[in-house]
Image (spheres, rainbow, N blue to C red):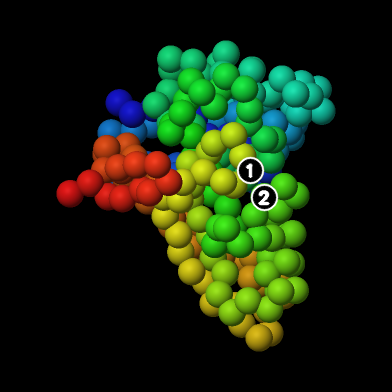
Amino acid sequence: MFKIAVLISGGGTDLQSIIDAIENKEIVGAKIAAVISDKKGAFGIERAKKHGIKTYVFDRKEYKGRVSDEVLNLLRGKVDLIVLAGFLSILNGDLLHEFKDKIINIHPSLIPSFCGNGMYGLKVHEKAIEYGVKISGCTVHFVDEGTDTGAIILQKAVEVLDEDTAETLQKRVLVEEHKLLPMAVKLIAEGKINKVGRHVSLKA
């Protein structure tokens, strides 16, 4: 059984997309072994509990710079993949080394545009609108020592409409996130991802 941990900070809609894909048998032979939040009261924890998934909270205000260490202590030797689904804490230290190429993140833009420090949530879409891009979207990528700098696994483009606000663009990008993230998890769980340096391809 391919075991997954999902890390969240908020409502957990991306988490829900993975739960649904597993329950609908779109992802076979995998289970979510743990859901971890870095924020007390995050609704994503309630989503997990509703589906009988073990939950843990390492509130970043309480744990400060120790969140990564706590996650590592909890997950070491217990999961095959860590999925960041709207997780706002920046991972660092031994966790990144022990889970090298086994941590993925979903970001609401076409990396390398509108990413990096301070670029999360609605801020990403505000910047896209402000810049006047015609295409935005979402990206699933491996996590490394940088912020949104890991190798890209999958991307999906979303047209930016003339009448778009950050909120309307966010809603349409989120629809694609809920397709792209489970797809990436499925490919990794099935061993179909081949990574050489920054280049990720599907195995034949």
Image location of residue 112, percent across then percent down: 57, 58
Left or right, 115 with respect to 18, comes to right
| Kind of residue sitting beneath label 2 | Gly
Q: Earlier in the sequence, mark 1 or mark 2?
A: 2
Q: Is residue 173 above or below residue 132?
A: above
Q: Residue furthest bottom?
A: 162
Image location of residue 72, percent across then percent down: 56, 18
Q: Which residue is mark 1?
A: 147
Q: What residue do we see at 68% from left, 69% from top?
A: 128
Q: What residue do we see at 68% from left, 78% from top?
A: 132
Q: Is residue 150 above or below residue 56?
A: below
Q: Which mark identifies residue 96?
A: none
> How far, Cα to Cα, is label 1 from label 2?
5 Å
Q: Nearer the viewer, residue 11 or 131?
A: 131
Image location of residue 43, percent across then percent down: 67, 41
Q: Residue furthest front?
A: 197
Q: Is residue 121 visible?
A: yes
Callout 1 secondary element:
loop
Image location of residue 40, percent across then percent down: 75, 31
Left or right, 126 with respect to 28, comes to right
From the image, which quarter does the N terminus lie in?
top left
Left or right, 3 with respect to 16, comes to left
Q: Which mark identifies residue 116?
A: 2
Q: Residue furthest right?
A: 61
Q: Nearer the viewer, residue 10 or 102?
A: 102
Q: Is residue 132 above or below residue 30?
A: below
| Kind of residue sitting beneath label 1 | Thr
Callout 2 secondary element:
loop
Task: Say if mark 1 contacts mark 2, CB within 8 Å.
Answer: yes
Q: What residue do we see at 43% from left, 15% from top?
A: 77
